Amino acid sequence: METEIINRVSTSDLVSFDLESIYPEGERIVFDIKDLLFEGIILREKDYREFIRTHNWESYSGKNIAICCSEDAIIPTWAFMLPVIKLQPYANMIVFGDLKTLEEKLWAEQISKLNISQYTDAKIVIKGCGKKNVPTFAYTELTRILKPIASSIMYGEPCSTVPLYKKPKV
């Protein structure tokens, strides 16, 4: 007697969400003011303004920029603001901070654009492991916005999930 094999995953009402599908594209670059310090410790305003005036800002077209100073130096706030003014017409995104800060901002923007109403009362599986580097921040942010509307949230693959949340029955 043969028993028919039924793929229960394909017939389930699970909704799979793959964060790789909204991966924020574009090169990530650090604009580090430390490279412009005199003797590695002092920002000379005249030299800095000359650099800002003559630098090829068009080379940042479509790129994502993190502005920082990785050297332990006292940098006036305006020194971080000047590159923003020059970068804004060209760069995709500009943040103050390091690459981690930039990555979080890129993901937060992508996630905020989602039409989450389609996930109302859904049993959602947030897909894990993939080919692209998706930071933990993206998983936690997606979970935060889905929890109020989802019926349940799981992590992994539809055939092997880790349960995270199940809406209480009223």
Image (cartoon, rainbow, N blue to C red):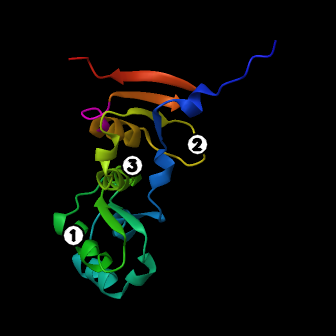
In magenta segment, residue 36: no
Say above or below: 62 vs 56.
above
- Seen at 45% across and 43% down, the residue is 135
Q: Amino acid at mark 2?
A: Gly
Q: Which circle, 3 or 2, is nearer the viewer? A: 2
Q: Is residue 158 visible?
A: no
When asked about the image quadrant of residue 45, the answer is bottom left
In magenta segment, residue 148: yes
Residue 30 in the image: x percent, y percent? Answer: 41, 62
The numbered mark, 1 or 2, whose residue comes first in the sequence reads 1
When asked about the image quadrant of residue 51, the answer is bottom left
Q: Residue furthest left?
A: 77
- Bounds of the magenta span? 146-150
The residue wearing badge 3 is: 100
* Residue 130 numbered mark, or none: 2
Q: Is residue 82 visible?
A: yes
Q: Which circle, 1 or 3, is nearer the viewer? A: 3
- Seen at 51% across and 24% down, the residue is 161
The numbered mark, 3 or 2, whose residue comes first in the sequence reads 3
Q: Main SS type for the magenta part?
A: loop
Q: How far is mark 1 from mark 2, CA to CA?
A: 37 Å
